[in-house]
């Protein structure tokens, strides 16, 4: 049985520590496609976060837990709950969160002024989940601290 997984929506937010600088952040959702409950492999996908600051800045980007209220695992809602997670690295070894509960954050110093940079978000839906067919989704808030 294959399960259709809806796009994971990344929402944006900002928190300024210095009012003299302004940064913007935008996101592209993550679409996992179909999930086969009988497959022995996880479903991996990627998304992007783009950001730009009008002054040279140090930034940190955090992700919240989404609708699950926990970083490990995050859960998409649908006919059932479908576990997934978002990672900082292609090996999917560091969960992207807010720096608590063993999660990491993305940080960059000296972000060039008026330059749009992109960061990849690595997503994974682990195999071995017995869920009903249907659409699944979650919304995660992206916050840029500068």
Image: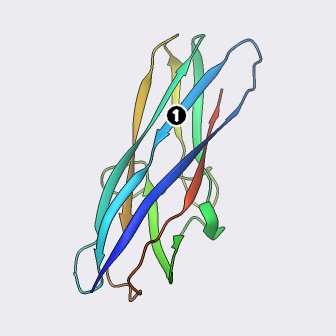
* Residue sitting at x 59%, y 17%: 57
Say left or right for 54 vs 120.
Answer: right
- Can you give x and y, in whole percent of width and height, for residue 135 in the image? 43, 72
* Residue sitting at x 34%, y 50%: 46
* Residue sitting at x 51%, y 53%: 9
- 63 or 29, which lies in front? 29
Colouring: rainbow
Q: How many marks?
A: 1
Q: Quadrant of the N terminus?
A: bottom left
> Element under label 1?
strand
Q: Quadrant of the C terminus?
A: top right
Q: Which picture quadrant has residue 61? A: top right
- Can you give x and y, in whole percent of width and height, for residue 126 in the image? 36, 74
Q: Is residue 55 above or below residue 76?
A: above
* Residue 60 visible to an observer of this rendering: yes
* Residue sitting at x 45%, y 20%: 116
Q: Is residue 84 above or below residue 81?
A: above
Q: Is residue 36 above or below residue 55?
A: below
**Other residues around mark 1 within 10 Å, as few (<14) / some (14–19) / many (≥20):** some
Q: Which picture quadrant has residue 69? A: bottom right
* Residue 73 visible to an observer of this rendering: no
- 4 or 26, which lies in front? 4
- Can you give x and y, in whole percent of width and height, for residue 81 in the image? 52, 80
- 56 or 38, which lies in front? 38
Say left or right for 54 vs 39.
Answer: right
- Can you give x and y, in whole percent of width and height, for residue 10 in the image? 53, 48
Q: Is residue 103 above or below residue 42?
A: above
Residue ID for mark 1: 26
């Amino acid at each position: 049985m294959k399960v259709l997984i809806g796009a994971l929506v990344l929402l944006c937010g900002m928190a300024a520590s210095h009012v003299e600088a302004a940064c913007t952040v935008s996101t592209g959702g993550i679409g996992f496609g179909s999930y086969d409950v009988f497959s022995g492999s996880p479903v991996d996908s990627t998304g992007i976060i783009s950001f730009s600051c009008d002054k040279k800045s140090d930034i940190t980007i955090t992700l919240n837990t989404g609708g699950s209220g926990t970083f490990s695992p995050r859960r998409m809602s649908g006919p059932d709950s479908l576990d997934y997670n978002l990672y900082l690295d292609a090996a999917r070894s560091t969960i992207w969160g807010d720096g608590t509960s063993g999660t990491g954050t993305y940080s960059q110093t000296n972000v060039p002024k008026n330059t749009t940079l992109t960061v990849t978000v690595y997503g994974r839906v682990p195999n071995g989940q017995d869920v009903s067919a249907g659409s699944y989704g979650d919304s995660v808030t992206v916050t840029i601290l500068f």
